Image (cartoon, rainbow, N blue to C red):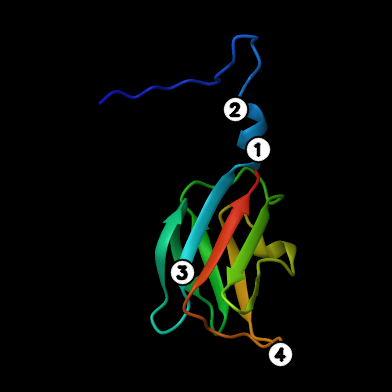
Amino acid sequence: MSTLKVNTIQNIGGTDLLAPLQSGSAKAWVKFKGTGTVSMYDSFNISSMTDNGTGSYQFNFTSNLANQNYAAIANSAGFFAHCGGALTNYQTTSFKVFVLNINGSNTDRDFNSAVVLGD
């Protein structure tokens, strides 16, 4: 098998086809189990996860992001999940996910996911 390495791909008119997509592409994603022994079902650019207590998780990037100005979106089936709340939850090396029940209390759930977009 061969490896093809290029900096840009252009159309016949010379327009860079990938540059508009690269900045907004998913830089990382994870689907994880947040109950019992927490674990990742599958992931991209996530090297490990840490259980920080009920409904609180940290994910470490395999390849660090360029800056902290990325968007991270979380989901937990039937519950509320978020990555925000404080800039310290967004690091170039990691990000945090919080899962809450309808009353706003942290809770552990079986099926959760998060996506990171940015540079």
Residue 37 screen position, x and y as percent:
38, 80
Q: Where does label 3 land, which residue? A: 32
| Residue 105: quadrant of the picture | bottom right
- 27 shown above or below 90: above
Q: Quadrant of the C terminus?
A: top right
Q: Dot 2 lies on which element? A: loop
Q: How many marks?
A: 4
Amino acid type, callout 1: Ser
The residue depicted at 48 percent of the width and 77 percent of the height is: 34
Q: Where does label 4 land, which residue? A: 103
Q: Where does label 1 land, which residue? A: 23
Q: Where does label 2 land, which residue? A: 18
Mark 3 to mark 1 CA distance (whole Å): 25 Å
Nearest-to-viewer mark from 2 and 1: 2
- 61 shown above or below 14: below
Q: Earlier in the sequence, mark 4 or mark 2?
A: 2
The residue depicted at 62 percent of the width and 42 percent of the height is: 66
